Amino acid sequence: MRIYDLILKKRDGEELSKAEISFIINGFVKGGIADYQMSAFLMAVYFRGMTSRESVNFTIAMADSGEKIDLSSISGFKVDKHSTGGVGDKTTLVLAPLVAACGGKIAKMSGCGLGHTGGTIDKLESIPGFKTSLTKEKFIKNVNKIGLAIMGQTAQIVPADKLIYALRDVTATVDSIPLIAASIMSKKLASGSNGIVLDVKTGSGAFMQKYEDALELAKLMVNIGENADQKTVALITNMDEPLGYAIGNSIEVKEAIDTLNGTGPKDLTNLCIELGGNMLLISGLVKNIKEGKGKIKKAIYNKSGLEKFKELVKIQDGNPAVVQNPSLLPQCKKIIEIKSEKSGYIEKINSCEVGIVSQILGAGRKTKNDTIDLSVGIYLKKKISDKIKKGETLAIFHTDGNKNKTNEAKDRFLNAYKISNKKVTPSKLLFAKITKNKVEIY
Ligand code: URA
C-alpha cells in the first residue's frame, strides 16, 4: 500500500477499506507517513466526508493506536458520560456522584478542556489537595470501593488523536464531523466503559452551533459506539446560554455542591436528571427512563449524591470539608458588579463571548501551556427571559484585581447580552434523544 494512492482514493470520493484505514493511522503514528501527507488526507476527508463504515473503522483504528484501559476487574456495567463542551458546564461534578449514589459504576477519564474555561480536571483541582493523577490500580480500586473515580486522561490513550488534532488545528480541518466523532469516540472506546451517554450541545456557546450539525454528529457517534460494542445514547441539549450561573473553576465547584444540595440552578439540575436517568437506564439499573430520572431526583433530595461527592473528594486526597464549607475553595482578590446599561428582557446571550470573557479574567487557557487562576470567573445574575432594569446587576466578576483585564472583560461582556423591550420565552433545555435506531425529538 502507498499513502499517495490512499489520499488519491479519498480525494476522488471512494470508500477506503478497513486495512487501508489501519495503514494510514498506524503509518502516521509510527512516523512513516509525513505530516504533509496526513494533512492532505484530512483535507480530503473534510471535503469528501466518510461513509458510516469508514467512520467506524477509522475510530477503532485510532482507539487501537495506544493503551486501552481494562475495567474488567470492576463488576457490573461501567457507564461513562461525555459532553461536547460548553460554557459553565460543570455537569460531571454533579452527575457522576448522583449516578454512583444510585448504584452506577463510573471510571471516568477526563481529557484536557478545549473550551474557554478549565475542564473537569481543573475544576476538581480547585479543591485543596484533590489528586487527578492516579495509577491505574488506584483508579480501579476506587471504583470498586465507592463506585466512582475521575482522573486525567493519560498520554498513552489514543496517541493518534493527539497527533491528528495538532495537524487539524493548523490546517483548518477541526470542524469536520467525521473527524470530531472519531476523535471523541476513540478516546471513549479506549477508556474501557461498557456504555456512554453523550451530551451533544448546540447553540451560541457550543462547538456545533447549528442544530442540524449537532444532530449529524450525535447520530454518527451513536452509530460508531454501537458498532464498537458500546451501548451509546446521545442527548442534544441547549448551549444558547451558559449552563447554570457560575463560569470559572472554584465557583463552578461551589455551584455543583449547591446542585447536589438541591439548591442549584434549574437548568443544570434538570440536565443532570435527564443525563443521569439515561445512564441508569443503559446500565440496566432501572426499567425505564421515568424510573431512572426518579432515582436521580431522590439522590438529590436525600443528599446521597452529595455524600458520594464527599467520598470522592476524600478518596482522591481532597479536603472533604469544602462540601460543608465552600469558602475553603480558592477565593478571588476582588469582586466587581457589572450593571446593565439598559432596561428590558434578556433576549440573547452570546455564550461563546461570555466564555472568552471568563478566559480574559484568567479562568481558562489561551494556549495549552498557560496557567489558569482557579479563583476567578463570572457569576451571572440574569439569563434568557429574565427582566432587568438599567443599573441593576447583570453579573458579578470574580477577579484578580487587574484593572486592564477587568475593563476589557466588562466591555465584551456587556456586548454579549442582547436586551429587548418585549417579553422573551425561556429557552428549551433538551432538543432530541438519539439511540441505536431512533431519533426522538422533544
Ligand atoms: N473534542 C474532541 O475531543 N475532539 C474534537 O475533534 C473536537 C472536540
Image (spheres, rainbow, N blue to C red):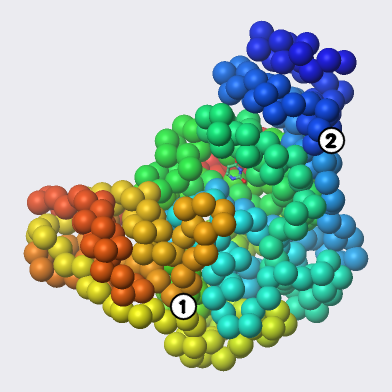
The answer to whether 65 is drawn above or below residue 399 in the figure is above
Q: Is residue 340 at all visible to an observer of this figure?
A: yes
For label 1, the SS is: helix
Type of the residue with mark 1: Lys
What residue is drawn where x is 15% and y is 63%? 340
Q: Nearer the viewer, residue 350 or 275?
A: 350
The answer to whether 8 is drawn above or below residue 231 in the figure is above
Would you say 279 lies left or right of 228 here? Answer: left
Q: Position of residue 366 (x, y in %)?
A: 47, 53
What residue is drawn where x is 77% and y is 60%? 78
Q: Position of residue 35 (x, y in %)?
A: 70, 28
Q: Quadrant of the C terminus?
A: top left
What residue is drawn where x is 72% and y is 15%? 7
Q: Nearer the viewer, residue 287 or 405?
A: 405
Q: Is residue 266 at all visible to an observer of this figure?
A: no
For label 2, the SS is: helix
Task: Give the numbered dot on residue 30.
Answer: 2
Would you say 161 lies left or right of 20 here? Answer: left
Q: Position of residue 397 (x, y in %)?
A: 30, 70
Q: Nearer the viewer, residue 436 or 351?
A: 351
Q: Nearer the viewer, residue 350 or 269?
A: 350
Type of the residue with mark 2: Lys
The image quarter in which residue 164 lies: top right
The answer to whether 328 is drawn above or below residue 345 in the figure is below
The image quadrant in which ligand 1 is located? top right
The answer to whether 429 is drawn above or below residue 137 in the figure is above
N-terminal of the two: label 2 or label 1?
2
Would you say 69 lies left or right of 216 here? Answer: right
What residue is drawn where x is 63% and y is 39%? 166
Query: Residue tagged by mark 1?
Result: 254
Q: What is the crowding at mark 1: few (fewer than 14 residues within 10 Å), some, or many (at least 20)? A: many
